[in-house]
Amino acid sequence: MGQRTGAGFLDPRAGRPDGKHRRGRPDRAPGARQTTVGAHIDVRHLAATPIGMQVRARAELMGVEGRRLFSIQAWDESELIGEADHERFVVDEAKFIGRVQAKGK
């Protein structure tokens, strides 16, 4: 697995490892949804993986303070192949999509 493919593999692993940010919070209006958006990822490619070998990854939530900071590790069938520190921000899904769509008008 190359570095660009590895970063693409690791990024969604931090998207919702506990699922909580997708369900909304009790202090939000009913039906309000939150999601996270990636802000920064620092990837270390440690070893190559041959085509066809299975890869697995694990994301660990390291902290939350208006943002979520994750540590991610990936292994192939024989060794650790990559690590990443990934920063994601919690956003209101509807407001975020609205801002992005308005930008294109």
Image (cartoon, grey):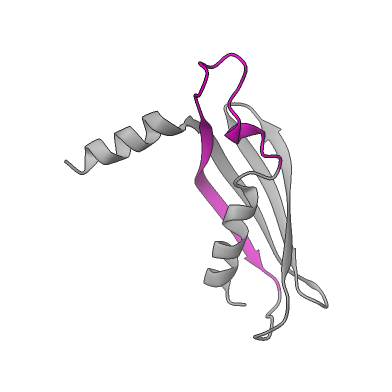
Horizontal side of 52 relative to 89 (left or right) equals: right
Q: Nearer the viewer, residue 78 or 23?
A: 23
Q: Quick one: which residue is furthest to the front in this view?
A: 31
Say whether residue 86 is magenta.
Answer: no
Where residue 60 sits: x, y (%)? 74, 46
Task: Pick the quarter of the image with the C terminus.
Answer: top left
Left or right of 51, for residue 32: left
Task: Tell how many labels.
Answer: 0
Question: Which sits in the foreground, 93 or 79?
Answer: 93
Residue 72 position within the rendered picture, expressed as x and y whole percent measured from the top left: 70, 54
- Name the residue: 53% across, 36% down: 35
> At 31% across and 34% down in the image, what residue appears?
99
The quarter of the picture where residue 5 lies is bottom right
Depth check, front residue: 76 or 39: 76
- On screen, 22 above or below 40? above
Above or below: residue 69 compared with residue 50: above
Residue range (magenta): 18-46
What residue occupies the far left of the structure in this picture? 105
Q: Residue at the spot x=71%, y=76% of the render?
A: 47
Q: Quadrant of the N terminus?
A: bottom right
Q: Position of residue 17 (x, y in %)?
A: 69, 45
Q: Is residue 42 magenta?
A: yes
**Toward which corner of the image does residue 94 lie, by quadrant?**
top left
Q: Position of residue 43 (x, y in %)?
A: 61, 60
- Left or right: where 4 falls relative to 64: left
